[in-house]
Image: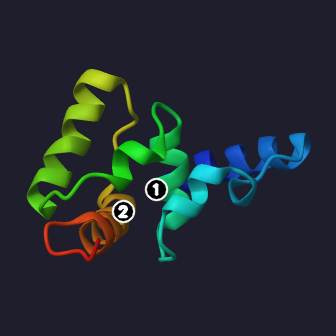
Amino acid sequence: MRPFLVAGLASILLSTGVFAEDDPDFALLPDGAAKEDVFYMCSACHSVKLVAQQRLSRKRWDETLDWMVEEGGMAELDPEERDPILDYLETHFGEEAPR
């Protein structure tokens, strides 16, 4: 996510006392460098359960992000934001990821 967007979300969550770690869906995501970014980006529109049940190739995850920008109104990600998210999704929810 854009650093200012992440900072803004964090500020709101801090002021309300709600943290990703308090959300049961957060536990569905394996630990990894982009775990929080994936959580906040995905859970803004749908349950993380939808992400956790997928087994997509990196190419399909990339196409899915494009679709969410074009059809779902998600903010477009810069490559420095997008690549770590794709790395995380491919590693934990890719075709070859352990179940």
Amino acid type at image mark 1: Val
The answer, for residue 23, to whether it is visible in the render is yes
In the displayed structure, 79 sits above or below 90; it is above
Q: Amino acid at mark 2?
A: Ile
Q: Which residue is more in the foreground, 30 or 63?
A: 30
Q: Which residue is the site of mark 1?
A: 38
Answer left or right for 62 relative to 82. left
Residue 85 is tagged as 2
Question: Which residue: 68% across, 50% down?
Answer: 23
Place of residue 1 in the rendered image (x, y in percent of width and height, measured from the top left):
48, 52
Task: Tell me whether the residue at label 2 lies in contact with that at label 1, contact meaning CB atoms closer than 8 angstroms.
Answer: yes
Q: Earlier in the sequence, mark 2 or mark 1?
A: 1
Q: CA distance from mark 2 to mark 1?
A: 6 Å
For the C terminus, the image quarter is bottom left
* Count of number-bearing discs: 2
Label 2, secondary structure: give it.
helix
